[in-house]
Amino acid sequence: MSAQLDLDSILEFTINLALEAGEMIRAGQQKRFASESSNEDEKVNSVDLVTEVDKAVEAFITKKIKETYPDHQFIGEETFKGEKVTDEPTWIGKSHQPSKCLTNPIDGTTNFIHGFPCVATSIGLAVGGKPVVGVIYNPFLDQLYSAAKGKGAYLNRKTKLPITGKGKPLQSLGHALIAIEYGSSRSAPALPSKVKTFQTLAASPELGGKMCHSLRSMGSAALNIATVASGGLDMYWEVGCWAWDVCAGICILEEAGGVMFGSKGSSLSGEVDSDLLTGRKYLAMRGIAPTSDESTLQVQQRFAKEFYDTTD
Ligand code: IPD
């Protein structure tokens, strides 16, 4: 399906868009920090935040995409009205809405507000419900992650991902560095259930835990996934993400030899789940060396199964 799209030029466009959006984010933060009246709006609750910079960056990204690809649909975090990411199998030749660009203008809005430098703009293009282009740019650390389907994933355009070597072995869950997030659902049953999983992953075996090397929390789903893709994290698990948090990352991760598992029941087939952009449950796993008995995917599935056995 994506063969009909010029992914090289779409990728170039998306990279330039992300760099420009990044400049807006950097400048927007300086302006906010210089102003005494800067504040943020609450969306669902007091930890689900949006700033005027999120809205301005999204408006900028939408405008550019609509000018360049007027037939494409757009789903963005700050303008979302419940649009569904549907599979549109016969989009080729259709004159309307053949693909969807899923963007998160600022992923890590809470970090942005506090000046914690894990902030990114995340722009992905999905065709037929599957991510085919992904760009994640952290303007504060000047890190640009990009990928197009079948063309590899890169950091700052030049360094092929994963940085730490494709398929370095992972001996056990106990040896893993795992990113987790609290997200913005802080009430029962969501939070206690997540915290139980965090505890199981971190605790020592006599407490019934896996005692993984450690847990990390970057506060940006996109950057967590990009770091799994680069090999700096073994896994990233979150329940509660939206399509715009993960679309770009999935493309980058897969191109780097990683895999994104979706909701528990449908995740172990090894293929991108049909609900991957809408399922809201994610386990990203980096490329892991095959063994003499198992392929890379089988090793990833084995770790995913062990991981899922620790979750509710
Ligand atoms: C959020 C961040 C956070 C994750 C949430 C996301 P936002 O995005 O990625 O780390 O835990 O699930 O919604 O609100 O900063 O765009």
Image: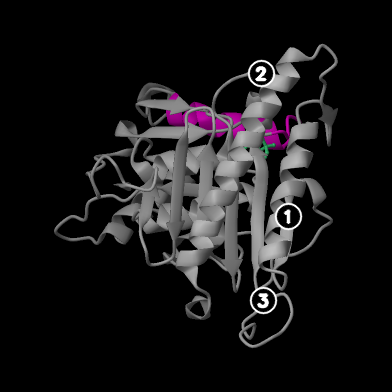
Q: Give the Cα distance between marks 1 and 2.
A: 26 Å
Q: Residue at x 38, y 53 (%)?
A: 153
Residue type (three-letter) at the residue carrying disc 2: His
Percent position of residue 148, x then y: 45, 62
Which residue is most to the left? 292
Answer above or below: position of 14 versus 96: above
User: The residue tagged with tag 3: helix, strand or loop?
Assistant: loop
Q: At label 1, which amino acid type do we have?
A: Thr
Please report whichever mark, 2 or 3, sits nearer to the chain's N-terminal start: 3
The residue under label 2 is 114
**Residue denoted by label 3:** 98
Q: Which residues are magenta?
A: 184-202
Residue farthest toward the top in the current orientation of the protein: 36
Q: SS of the residue at dot 1?
A: helix
| Observer able to see residue 257 | yes
The reply, left or right, for residue 274 in relation to residue 204 is right
Q: Are marks 3 and 1 in contact (CB under 8 Å)?
A: no
- Residue placed under numbered mark 1 in the picture: 62
Three-letter code for the amino acid on which mark 3 is drawn:
Pro
The residue under the point 52% across, 30% down is 198
Rounded to the nearest whole Å, what is the CA distance between mark 3 and mark 1?
A: 16 Å
**Mark 3 surroundings: few (<14), some (14-19) or many (≥20) residues within 10 A:** some
Horizontal and vertical percent position of residue 253: 42, 52
Residue 187 point in image, percent of width and height: 76, 31
Coloring applied to the structure: one colour
Upstream in sequence: badge 1 or badge 2: 1
The residue nearer to you, when weighing 170 against 188, is 170
Dot 3 or dot 1: first in sequence order is: 1
Can the viewer see residue 276? no
Quarter placement of the C terminus:
top right
